[in-house]
């Protein structure tokens, strides 16, 4: 599953300033939650699995989906809505309702006394969506969020119409050799002054806990089990697999994922599959979500395509 090396020193050095997403939240989805400012949008909280979980709802002011399911955004590790999706959220929200979820210890969602685990965060997300009345959604996950989205596709297929998995691997062989070697050497101070750190100081319930937060993310990276290919292939929803051509995920692994999701066939002979593959040129793991020029033509077209 996703090894989310956003938290390495190399990634911290490479990251550039990101723009916090804009839009207006809809109170229709979560009238039980408390509103709070979140950049130029508004946020809500819901009590889920011991968490006071934060999410934002952007999109048409009437809160309607224009006949489409909502699009759920799941951010990367050490990140939140702004640093993961600030470049693409405003335009995605012009035509559909977008729900951006912030996971345990990330963004506005306070930490609780349990470790960070992909499976746990996936269960939190499923419980949140059900609580706020989302019956079925399209889900766009990046890095750690893509691992969560994949878990949802496997364990909660009733919640998922389509999946967009950006920079995800389902086993260690999916990563370039040596990519995980620097995890133990990462220190919280290596990230001081980075967009991740600045975002955390601005919006976290306890900004003084950043060092502890980094250590929990390091522990998460060391405790993500490999998934069997059969589990990945069990996903029934159409999947758009995205990777940068210079990502931490090997391009060969992105092709392997595409095949497990039903792709890699001669489309002229048998027709196009419901799943798609995109390798973004000139793109690293950290810069992938900044490539609005490439993502915005690809993602909405995939989500809007009819399922055969």
Image (cartoon, rainbow, N blue to C red):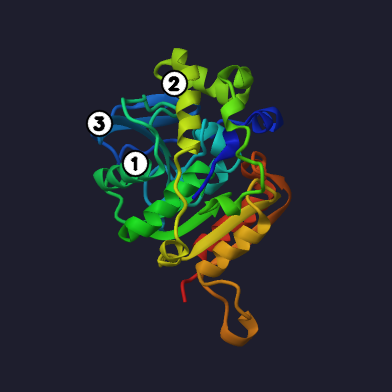
From this view, report whether residue 237 is shown above or below residue 30: below
Residue at which label 3 appears: 50
Where in the figure is residue 58, as x and y percent of width and height?
Answer: 44, 40
Between 224 and 191, the one nearer to me in the picture: 224
Residue mark closest to the camera, 1 vs 3: 1
Residue reaching furthest top? 208
Compared to residue 224, the image places residue 195 above or below, namely above
- Image position, residue 245 (x, y; %): 71, 52
In-image side of 181 versus 133 (left or right) = right
Q: Say few, some or many: other residues with alpha carbon within 10 Å of mark 2 (under 14 / 14 to 19 / 20 or more).
A: some
- The residue under label 2 is 204
Foreground residue among 14 and 17? 14
**As drawn, which residue projects farthest toward the bottom?**
269
Looking at the picture, how far across and down is residue 104, in whole percent?
38, 32
Q: Residue at x 57, y 26 (%)?
A: 196
Q: As displayed, is residue 85 above or below residue 308?
A: above
Residue 120's disc is 1
């Amino acid at each position: 599953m996703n090894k989310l090396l956003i938290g390495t020193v190399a990634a911290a050095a490479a990251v550039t300033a990101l723009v916090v997403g804009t839009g207006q939240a809809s109170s229709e989805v979560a009238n039980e939650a408390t509103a709070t400012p979140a950049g130029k949008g508004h946020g809500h909280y819901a009590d889920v699995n011991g968490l006071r979980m934060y999410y934002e709802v952007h999109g048409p002011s009437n809160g309607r989906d224009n006949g489409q399911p909502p699009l759920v955004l799941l951010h990367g590790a050490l990140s939140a809505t702004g640093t993961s999706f600030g470049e693409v959220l405003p335009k995605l929200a012009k035509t559909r309702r977008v729900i951006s979820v912030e996971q345990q210890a990330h963004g506005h969602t306070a930490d609780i006394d349990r470790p960070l685990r992909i499976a746990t965060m996936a269960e939190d997300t499923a419980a949140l969506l059900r609580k706020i009345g989302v019956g079925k959604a399209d889900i766009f996950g990046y890095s750690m969020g893509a691992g969560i989205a994949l878990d949802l596709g496997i364990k909660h297929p009733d919640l998922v119409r389509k999946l967009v998995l950006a920079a995800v691997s389902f086993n260690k062989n999916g990563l370039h050799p040596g990519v995980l070697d620097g995890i133990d050497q990462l220190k919280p101070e290596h990230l001081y002054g980075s967009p991740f750190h600045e975002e955390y100081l601005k919006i976290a319930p306890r900004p003084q806990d950043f060092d502890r937060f980094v250590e929990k993310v390091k522990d998460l990276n060391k405790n993500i089990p490999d998934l069997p290919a059969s589990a990945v292939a069990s996903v029934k929803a159409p999947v758009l697999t995205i990777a940068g051509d210079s990502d931490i995920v090997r391009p060969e692994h992105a092709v392997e994922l595409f095949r497990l999701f039903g792709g890699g066939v001669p489309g002229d002979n048998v027709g196009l599959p419901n799943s798609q593959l995109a390798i973004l040129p000139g793109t690293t793991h950290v810069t992938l979500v900044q490539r609005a020029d490439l993502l915005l033509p690809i993602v909405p077209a995939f989500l809007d395509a009819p399922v055969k």
